[in-house]
Image (tube, rainbow, N blue to C red):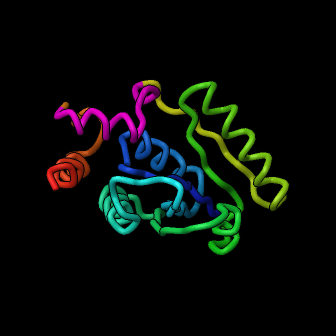
Amino acid sequence: MKRAIYPGSFDPVTLGHIDVIKRASSLFDWLIIGVLNNRAKSPLFSVEERVKMLKEVTKDIPNVEVKSFGGLTVDFARECGANALVRGLRAITDFEYELQIAQLNRVIDPNIDTVFLTTNLKYAYLSSSSVKEVAAYGGDISHFVTPYVENEVHKKLKR
């Protein structure tokens, strides 16, 4: 069984993330979305909230599982029995950063490959950070996230 990890912060999950998830789930037998618990960042949503949102937006994709993790992505991949990491690329600047990480991961574990999926052009500009910024100023984020996630973002920002 070919298993892959799609790691990220997903704070919040965007339509661009969902596009990559759907495409990656068609390439692998099993796709595990790894929600990173990164202590260096101050996310809007807790890890548990992000896992819950991802489970909701991927509930119709039968070969997708959502888990949280901390530490090295390659260690998480080994724990899950995955042989590939999936990363989405929006721009050339993403590639430079992602290539360095992929090469580093390859040195740490030569049995785990990184697969890059270029983002659908209609989401090339989209990031979780931009969604949060637009929402914080009262802007319409309905073109960037699912209605469920939009509601969760608005609820969080009202607190």
Report x, y in % for residue 4: 62, 59
- Residue at the spot x=41%, y=46% of the render? 18
Left or right: where 44 falls relative to 107 = left
| Residue 2, picture quadrant | bottom right
Relative to 71, residue 121 above or below = above
Magenta-drawn stretch contains 144? no
Q: Is 118 left or right of 107, judged from the image as shown?
A: left
Q: State which quadrant residue 74 falls in.
A: bottom right
The C terminus - image quarter: bottom left
Picture coordinates of residue 121, whole percent (x, y)? 46, 24
Q: Nearer the viewer, residue 147 or 25?
A: 147
- Going 44% across and 44% down the picture, which residue do you hit? 17
Point out residue 127 in the picture as x, y percentages from the top left corner: 42, 36
Q: Residue at x 23, y 49 (%)?
A: 153
Q: Say whether residue 6 is visible.
A: yes
Q: Main secondary structure of the magenta part?
A: helix
Query: Toward the viewer: 49 or 89?
Result: 49
**Total numbered labels:** 0
Name the side, left or right, on which 135 lies relative to 75.
left
User: Which image quarter is the N terminus in?
Assistant: bottom right
Q: Which residue is located at x 29 percent, y 42 percent?
A: 145
Q: Please report the bounds of the magenta region as a residue range.
A: 122-138
Instruction: Decide if residue 60 is in sight here.
Output: no
